[in-house]
Image (cartoon, coloured by chain):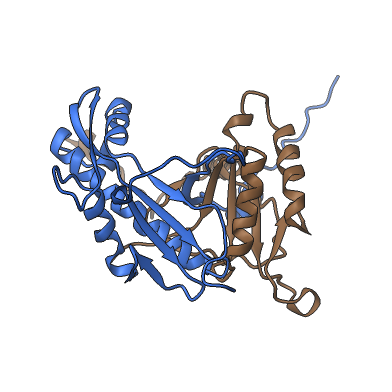
Amino acid sequence: MARKLPEVNAGSMADIAFLLLVFFLVTTTMDTDTGLVRKLPPPVPKDVKPPDVKERNIMKILVNKRDRLLVNNKEGSLYTLKDEVKDFMSIHPNNESYPEINIKSIELLGDVPTSKGIVSLKNDRGTSYEMYIQVQNELARAFKELRDELSMEKFGKKYSKLVKEEQKKAIEAAVPMRISEAEPENIGGN
Amino acid sequence: MSRFKKKKGSGLPAINTSSLPDIIFMLLFFFMVTTVMRENTTIVKTRLPQASEVQKLMKKSLVSYIYIGEPRNVKLYGNESRIQLNDQFSSVGDIPEFIYSEREARDEADRRLLTTSLKVDYKTKMGVVTDVKQELRKVGAFKINYSTRKKVYK
């Protein structure tokens, strides 16, 4: 005859579980990596000439090793950079001092005028990373606000609040984020 | 009428705690599943800059990290910005190999989705970062992410 096994005391089970729980609570890191996502251009072959772009279509931003800005050959500041970029990239038909306009037909939006403008960013080897990120951030803000405005007009919603993938694609096509980073070279000397 | 009269207990009844372990276990499993142990110890300082237009990086398994910054142990290694790949100091020339080995470790279908996250100290000079970017372009790792902390605009 098998003897009846004595029952295991489960009273301390909660304590053990608590201990494990506290361990995982302490070691857990819920931080999701956040950052500015960019796409690098593929390397340019040596014998290919860069495409000619008209002077009026380019906005030149230079950052020197002292973290000072030069925007279109004038001294600029981080505080005004966003509005300057926004102004440059917004649509001004028949105005010589703004970039050319290209009429694109995009699904959901129909024919929309898009700017041919390009923001060209060039930095020195001595520029601090913090400044570089600030500039990139201001550029991103400018494009985001332009997209928000168009999206508000067309869909009645901000771009960041859009849910449908087609609508996002349409806005992205109408306001492309055109930031060109120059091939590295030393400017202003080190 | 006496049948509607409530039985008067003596004092408060004890709360049944027999399901407490189950509740705790449930919490425990939640944290066990969501927890991510820090995979890399950094030997360089990476105090990230702040930006407001940040995006979340999805799919952590498809991200490889490059750390750039001043060594933690300044007395031993000096204060020049260095690159850290995996767990050691590296030079710019080691980056192609690093990217190839990172690709090798992923499924064939996922390889083109691989993102390189640059965790760079805010005091670093752009020279090093530019060199790294050039090297990444050469090996075709075009998707990059400048890791930043989120700043809320006032």
| Whole-percent x, y for residue B20 in the image | 53, 44
* Residue visible at 73% across and 77% down in the picture: B74
Q: Is B68 drawn above or below residue B26 in the view shown? A: below
Q: Which residue is nearer to you in this view: B124 or B72? A: B124
Q: What is the residue that sits farthest to the bottom in this orientation?
A: B75
Q: Is B55 drawn above or below residue A110 in the view shown? A: below
Quarter of the C terminus of chain A within the rendering: bottom right
Q: What is the residue that sits farthest to the top in this orientation?
A: A1
| Whole-percent x, y for residue B105 in the image | 73, 34
Who's blue, chain-wise? A
Who's brown, chain-wise? B
Q: Is residue B106 left or right of residue A83?
A: right
Q: Is B75 drawn above or below residue B32 in the view shown? A: below
| Whole-percent x, y for residue A149 in the image | 19, 45
User: Residue A81: in sight, yes or no?
Assistant: yes
Q: Is A3 drawn above or below residue A116 in the view shown? A: above
User: Residue B28: in sight, yes or no?
Assistant: no
Quarter of the N terminus of chain A within the rendering: top right
Q: Is residue A73 left or right of residue B104?
A: left
Q: Which residue is nearer to you in this view: B130 or B9? A: B130
* Residue visible at 67% across and 68% down in the picture: B81
Q: What is the residue that sits farthest to the right in this orientation?
A: A1
Q: Which residue is nearer to you in this view: B62 or B28? A: B62
Q: Which residue is nearer to you in this view: A35 or B1? A: A35
| Whole-percent x, y for residue A164 in the image | 29, 28
